Image (cartoon, rainbow, N blue to C red):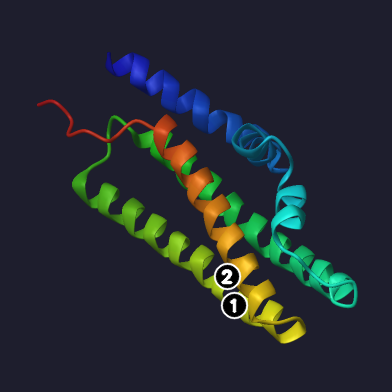
């Protein structure tokens, strides 16, 4: 059973490691929503024609930073798979602290860009941006959590 769980974890994490271009993230988006992320955002965030260019320029900047954080997530998943069977309590604690810090950075990035979007548009558009980004993020996090096995204490 342990070998089976380990194999699943390694295969899952390896799939992320092979595509540093975020192809798997695109696949996750299409699986969850049936289209790419920008199309989902464009469908939900209603930007006026006068705000459109400024919004998408800002959104592209946001996506560049968000994808960099996604690469950090991939590295943490690779660490998890590599040490799944031999995590010590100290290593598990350190790994978890890194995951928590990364989630905070990701959430803070959305909050930062909420303010930037509001500055070039209005509170409705900024709120739509905030809502859809959090919804997408929660959906992606859930898909990842469903595929990564829970850590267990090593047998003695």
On the picture, is 24 further left or further right than 139? right
Label 1, residues with CA under 10 Å away: few <14, some 14-19, many ≥20 = few
Q: Which sits in the foreground, 141 or 96?
A: 141
Q: Which sits in the foreground, 85 or 111?
A: 111
Identify the disc placed on residue 61. Answer: none
Q: Which sits in the foreground, 30 or 61?
A: 30
Q: Which sits in the foreground, 134 or 11?
A: 134
On the picture, is 151 further left or further right than 4? left
In the image, residue 106 above or below residue 25: below
Q: Give the CA separation, mark 1 to mark 2.
A: 5 Å
In the image, residue 34 above or below residue 124: above
Tell me the residue that label 2 is attached to: 109
Residue at horizontal 51 percent and vertical 23 percent from the top: 11
Identify the disc placed on residue 112. Answer: 1
On the picture, is 27 further left or further right than 106? right
Q: Quadrant of the N terminus?
A: top left
Q: Position of residue 39 (x, y in %)?
A: 77, 49
Q: Position of residue 96 (x, y in %)?
A: 33, 53
**SS category of the residue bearing label 1:** helix
C-beta proximity under 8 Å, tags 1 and 2:
yes
Q: Quadrant of the C terminus?
A: top left
**SS category of the residue bearing label 2:** helix
Q: Position of residue 135 (x, y in %)?
A: 53, 54
Residue 58 location, quadrant: bottom right
| Extreme residue toward the left, this view | 156
Residue 85 location, quadrant: top left
Label 2, residues with CA under 10 Å away: few <14, some 14-19, many ≥20 = some
In the image, residue 131 above or below residue 88: below
The answer to whether one can see residue 113 in this image is: no
Residue at horizontal 77 percent and vertical 56 percent from the top: 42
């Amino acid at each position: 059973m342990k070998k089976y769980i380990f194999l699943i974890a390694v295969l899952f994490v390896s799939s992320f490691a092979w595509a540093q271009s975020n192809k798997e993230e695109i696949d996750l988006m299409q699986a969850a929503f049936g289209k790419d992320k920008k199309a989902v955002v464009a469908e939900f965030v209603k930007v006026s024609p006068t705000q459109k260019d400024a919004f998408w320029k800002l959104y592209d900047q946001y996506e560049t930073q968000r994808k960099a954080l996604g690469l950090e997530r991939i590295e943490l998943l690779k660490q998890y798979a590599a040490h799944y069977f031999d995590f010590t309590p100290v290593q598990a604690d350190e790994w978890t602290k890194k995951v928590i810090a990364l989630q905070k950075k990701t959430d803070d990035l959305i909050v930062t860009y909420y303010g930037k979007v509001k500055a070039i548009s209005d509170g409705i558009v900024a709120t739509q941006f905030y809502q859809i980004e959090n919804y997408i993020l929660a959906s992606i996090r859930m898909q990842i959590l469903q595929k990564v096995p829970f850590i267990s204490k090593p047998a003695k």
